[in-house]
Image (cartoon, grey):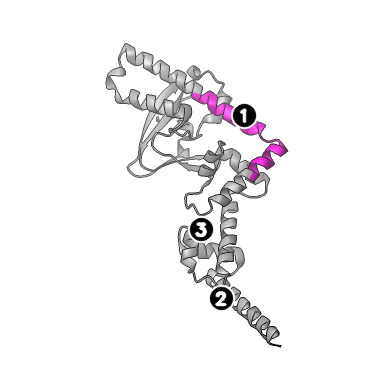
């Protein structure tokens, strides 16, 4: 992309390899190979590139997409998965188009470029329709139903270390932005909800005196990246380390058991 603002064109990036992330409305999404994203040179800072990464950029005249400037702004920076739907069609077509150098200065290449622009206009309309659907789903009944489904999904996948806002949104066919909005209305965030549920289950497991299990095993089983991260998070939530809680719970259980035994003897 150029370093200066280009008000006549929009740029579409197709991810090829390496670590690339898109920051959109506070959400950071890592792109997978073949994923797409519409970009504006004026907001190039929203793309975060790692080492040895490659993207193919296509310059598209804004006027060819058939949408208003405000509508186009709604899709800029929105990650599009290249493995499904129109996103997959666009990704495959554009990748093939870029690979054929002879198409760039030929009649057939011009025709394929026009076909690509038409395909991208359909992709833009699909993204706008998805945003409209998100807004329509804001009715209280629909929100509660969706939240219940999402909570149930999270419970079923708490052991999955790859559970994330992106995977949750993808499983429910909604955008990450809308997913975050649902949880914000409920007074939380997706990540906070997942973390709290994992902590609660870990606390229960560690408090069972009949379970001879280590803190590291519990942390790993319930999706925490490392024992040290789990320990810091646990202390922040409950004011003590996991080992301190385990010792306290075991001691309390032993005292209660001993008292019950004495009562039976009497």
Residue 236 seen anywhere in this rendered image of the structure: yes
How far apart marks 2 and 3 lie (CA) works out to 20 Å
Question: Circle 2 sits on which residue?
Answer: 247
Q: Which of 169 and 45 is in front in this view?
A: 169
For the residues labelled 3 and 1, the Cα–Cα distance comes to: 36 Å
Percent from the top left, x then y, of residue 43?
A: 48, 34
Q: Give the range drawn in magenta.
A: 123-148
Q: Name the residue under label 1.
A: 132
Q: Where is residue 109 in the image (x, y as percent from the top left)?
A: 33, 16
Quarter of the image where one finds residue 147: top right
Quarter containing the N terminus: top left
The crowd level at tag 3 (other Cα within 10 Å; few <14, some 14-19, many 20+) is: many
In the rendered image of this protein, does residue 249 appear above or below residue 170?
Answer: below
Most distant residue in the top direction: 107
Q: Are marks 1 and 2 in contact (CB under 8 Å)?
A: no
Q: Which mark is residue 222?
A: 3
Is there a contact, CB below 8 Å, between mark 3 and mark 1?
no
What's the residue at 56%, 23% (across, down)?
69
SS of the residue under disc 1: helix
Sort mark 1 into few (<14), some (14-19) or many (20+) by Cα contacts within 10 Å: few
At label 2, counting other C-alpha atoms closer than 10 Å, the crowd grade (few under 14, some 14-19, many 20 or more) is some
Question: At numbered mark 3, what does the secondary structure look like: helix, strand or loop?
Answer: loop
Whichever of labels 3 and 1 marks the residue nearer the N terminus, that label is 1
Q: Position of residue 115 (x, y in %)?
A: 42, 17
Residue occupying the point 47% across, 53% down: 161
Q: Nearer the viewer, residue 206 or 266?
A: 266
Q: Does the magenta stretch include residue 125?
A: yes
**N-terminal of the two: label 2 or label 3?**
3
> Which mark lies nearer to you, 1 or 2?
2
Which part of the image, by quadrant, shows the C terminus?
Answer: bottom right
SS of the residue under disc 2: helix
Secondary structure of the magenta portion, mostly? helix
């Amino acid at each position: 992309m150029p370093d200066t603002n280009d008000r006549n064109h929009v740029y579409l990036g197709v991810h090829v390899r390496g670590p690339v992330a898109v920051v959109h409305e506070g959400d950071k999404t890592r792109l997978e190979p073949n994923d797409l994203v519409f970009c504006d040179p004026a907001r190039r800072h929203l793309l975060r590139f790692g080492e040895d990464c490659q993207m193919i950029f296509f310059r598209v005249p804004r006027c060819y997409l058939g949408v208003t400037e405000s509508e186009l702004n709604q899709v800029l920076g929105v990650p599009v998965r290249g493995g499904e739907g129109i996103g997959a069609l666009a990704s495959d077509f554009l990748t093939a188009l870029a690979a054929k150098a002879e198409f760039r200065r030929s009649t057939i290449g011009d025709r394929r470029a026009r076909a690509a622009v038409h395909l991208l206009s359909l992709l833009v309309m699909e993204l706008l329709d998805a945003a409209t659907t998100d807004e329509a789903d804001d009715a209280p009944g629909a929100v509660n139903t969706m939240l219940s489904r999402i909570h149930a999904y999270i419970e079923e996948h708490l052991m999955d270390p790859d559970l994330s806002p992106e995977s949750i949104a993808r499983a429910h066919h909604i955008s990450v932005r809308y997913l975050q909005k649902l949880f914000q209305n409920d007074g939380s965030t997706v990540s906070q909800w997942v973390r709290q549920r994992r902590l609660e289950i870990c606390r229960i497991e560690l408090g069972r005196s009949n379970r001879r299990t280590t803190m590291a095993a519990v942390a790993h089983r319930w999706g925490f990246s490392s024992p040290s991260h789990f320990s810091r998070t646990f202390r922040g939530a409950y004011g003590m380390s996991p080992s301190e809680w385990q010792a306290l719970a075991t001691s309390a259980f032993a005292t209660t058991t001993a008292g019950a035994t004495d009562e039976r003897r009497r």
